[in-house]
Amino acid sequence: GVPVTSVEANPRLRARDHPRNSEAVRAGLERDGVKVRTGVRAVKAVPGGGVDGAHRIELGDGTSVEGHRMTGDVAFKVG
């Protein structure tokens, strides 16, 4: 496999689900080797700005994550 990190701005995954369901999802992902970061927002993408040409995503807490492949969901608040 490849290293995977999931970044979620909400304090938990599946924020609209019951907290137990959210924790079950998190536990399953972590059991499969996914690093889960909750309560932190992606603030900037730096294409090719990481090690070995990886893309870097800078996070609101001053840390960053890197990867050669990125996927994402973006929500906008209007008004």
Image (cartoon, rainbow, N blue to C red):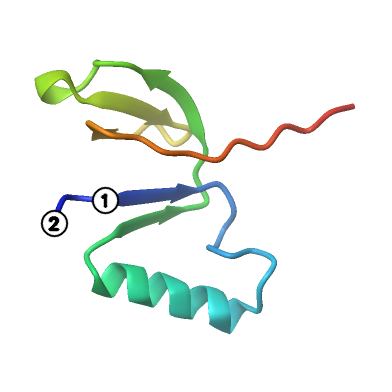
Which image quadrant for residue 32? bottom left
Left or right: residue 39 versus residue 59 is: right
- Verify CB contact (< 8 Å) between mark 2 and mark 1: yes
Name the mark on residue 1: 2
Left or right of 52, for residue 41: right
Measured along the vertical axis of the image, is residue 55 above or below residue 75? above
Q: Which quadrant holds residue 57? A: top left
Identify the element where label 2 is drawn. Answer: loop
| Residue drawn where x is 48% and y is 39% of the image | 72
Name the residue: 45% across, 22% down.
44
**Nearest-to-viewer mark from 2 and 1:** 2
Q: Establish if 20 lies above or below 51.
A: below
Amino acid type indicated by mark 2: Gly
Secondary structure beneath disc 1?
loop
Alpha-carbon distance for marks 2 and 1?
9 Å
Give the residue pinned by disc 1.
4
Q: Work out whether 65 lies above or below 9.
A: above
Say which of 74 and 15 sits in front. 74
Q: Position of residue 56 (x, y in %)?
A: 30, 25
Quadrant placement of the N terminus: bottom left
Res. 77 mark: none
How packed mark 2 is, by other alpha carbons closer than 10 Å (few <14, some 14-19, many 20 or more), is: few
Please name the amino acid that badge 1 sits on.
Val
